[in-house]
Image (cartoon, rainbow, N blue to C red):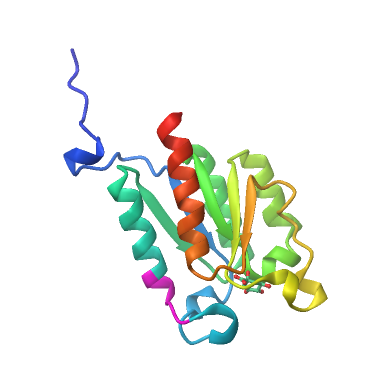
Amino acid sequence: MKKQKDTSPESGKLPDTVAVLVLHGPNLNLLGTREPKHYGSSTLAEINLALAHRAAAAGVLLEAFQSNHEGALIERVHAASTQGVRYLIINPAAYTHTSIALRDAIAASAIPFVEVHLSNVHARESFRHHSCFSDLAIGVITGLGSEGYLLALEYLLRRISVE
Ligand code: DQA
């Protein structure tokens, strides 16, 4: 019988397949210095590290990808479909309000996702109130700063643990 790789959290080893892909849209590479009153002081690297550690503690492989280019985000979603990614956490940033193309890519992938925003988009300019993604999302977390990503991950880890 083929020996199964022990990927239980206790084993310290992670599975090879990315289960949770975190997608960050344009300008989020500037977190830490970008408009801290809206987006806080954590850098993207700090957020990604906290997410990867939390996922690893649950025996789940998490990868994060940021791009300032719509096409690159779309192609990462296409790749995710063929890689067996189970869930997305996505902050589409300004593409939230404009990108039917990224919405279509996620819809085509059929990968369930949680939409996250650092700031409370509903308490800001009216052009931020509309999202091209929210009606497709499992849920939306907005206004809880970088903790929003971790709360989204907690929820997905719970789902993964009962699947
Ligand atoms: C954002 C809100 C968007 O309106 C904005 O364009 C962003 C970040 C947020 O995380 O609060 O870039 O998605």
Q: Residue at x 38, y 71 (%)?
A: 45
The answer to whether 59 appears left or right of 74 in the picture is: left
Image quarter of residue 160: top left
Q: Which residues are magenta?
A: 41-46
Q: Using the image, determine if residue 100 lies above or below residue 27.
A: above
Q: Residue at x 70, y 52 (%)?
A: 103
| Residue 35 seen in the current view | no
Where does residue 62 sit, x and y in percent of width and height? 39, 51
Front residue of this view, candidates 158 and 79: 158
Residue sitting at the far top: 1
Q: Using the image, determine if residue 82 lies above or below residue 35.
A: above
Where does residue 136 sit, x and y in percent of width and height? 71, 46
Q: Residue at x 71, y 48 (%)?
A: 104
The answer to whether 92 appears left or right of 1 in the picture is: right
Front residue of this view, candidates 94 and 122: 122
Q: Residue at x 19, y 39 (%)?
A: 10
Where does residue 47 sit, x and y in percent of width and height? 41, 68
Where does residue 46 sit, x and y in percent of width and height? 37, 71
Q: Quadrant of ligand 1?
A: bottom right
Is residue 158 in the magenta section?
Answer: no
Quarter of the rendering occupied by the N terminus: top left
